[in-house]
Amino acid sequence: MSRRTTILLSCLLLACLAGSIFVLGRIQARYPLSPMEDVLFLPSPQFVKRASLGYSGLLADIYWMRAVQYFGGKRHRDSMEYRALAPLLDITTTLDPNLEIAYEYGATFLQQPPPSGAGDTEAAISLVQKGIRNNPQASHLYATLGFIQYLGQHDYAAAAKTFEEGAKKTQAYAWMGIMAAKMLTDAGSLETARYMWQNILDDATDKRLKENAELHLACLTVDEEVPQLERIVMEFRARFGRNPTSWRELIGVGALRGVPLDPTGAPYVLANGGKVRVADPKKLPFITTGKPS
């Protein structure tokens, strides 16, 4: 192929990419809730890479931006389906196998339960394992895989092995070796979960990763506080033969110092039957207690 032909084809590819982005933007502006957004008229990732004519890095960045926009739009609408997310991430990381951010963030997008994410733990694990194969020294990918195995699969033995392997890599997080031990001794405790998320928060440099860790820590606080509050209600019931009708009643008998607030600053709800609920579960998507019945 002559140099002139190569230049012409490259210019054509770039023009097509620019045109596609423009048209996609116009379509999304005209039909922001279109059900067609989950339909990918795309060949295999390998074909896309062959067709990139050497511009696979540029095309990977475009697909990564598309994946982030797709995820953000779905999450904003509290969607329960993210069918195009895994294919978009597969194409992105095939075009650029060293785009570590796509593995790390993409796996998080995939693993989180709907509507905060796709709720596809298997796809998340498959993606980050692909990242480790292509970037074997990236210790943060081992950390990502370990916490997905821990939180998503409750496979503590696999998580322990992953954290242990990651701890051996250059520039590994100092806490990974400790997490490997905790997986084998005290994996199911809130203390272990808090230890992990606090270390992720402390080590993260990206704003979104920090916000994600802060949200998980807030949800762990709810999981600790709701059982404590329900025990206080049970003690009132044992003492007076009925459930309290309000927090003020519990304050009046000295069981509480004030109205209890959840991590968002909203008062906990004292529901029928002595159950304690958070005011807005959507703001605390990872709680295991305090959900509506």
Image (cartoon, rainbow, N blue to C red):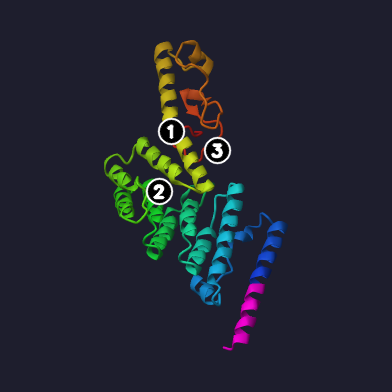
What is the magenta segment's predominant secondary structure?
helix
Secondary structure, mark 2, is helix
Task: Report how far apart the C-alphas of labels 1 and 2 lie in the structure.
Answer: 17 Å
Say which of 218 and 86 sits in front.
218
Q: Earlier in the sequence, mark 3 or mark 1?
A: 1
Say which of 227 and 215 sits in front.
215
Disc sitting over residue 180 in the figure: none
Left or right: residue 13 versus residue 222 is right
Whether residue 246 is visible to the viewer of this picture, yes or no, is no
- The residue indicated by pointer 2 is 152
CB under 8 Å between callouts 3 and 1? Answer: no
Q: Residue 156: where, in percent of width, then height?
A: 31, 47
Q: Residue 87: where, in percent of width, then height?
A: 51, 63
Q: Earlier in the sequence, mark 2 or mark 3?
A: 2
- The image quarter in which residue 182 lies: top left
Magenta highlight range: 1-15
- Split into 4 quadrants, where in the image is the N terminus? bottom right
Whether residue 144 is visible to the viewer of this picture, yes or no, is yes
Q: Residue 9: where, in percent of width, then height?
A: 62, 81
Disc sitting over residue 223 in the figure: 1
- The image quarter in which residue 38 lies: bottom right
Instruction: Look at the image and say whether residue 2 sits in the magenta stretch.
Output: yes
Task: Report how far apart the C-alphas of labels 3 and 1 lie in the structure.
Answer: 14 Å
Q: Residues within 10 Å of mark 2 (few under 14, many from 20)?
A: some
Q: Residue 122: where, in percent of width, then height?
A: 41, 56
Instruction: Look at the image and say whether residue 146 sits in the magenta stretch.
Output: no
Say which of 105 and 125 sits in front.
105
Q: Residues within 10 Å of mark 1 (few under 14, many from 20)?
A: some
Q: What's under tag 3, amino acid-wise?
A: Lys
Q: Residues within 10 Å of mark 3 (few under 14, many from 20)?
A: some
Disc sitting over residue 283 in the figure: 3
Q: What's under tag 2, amino acid-wise?
A: Gly
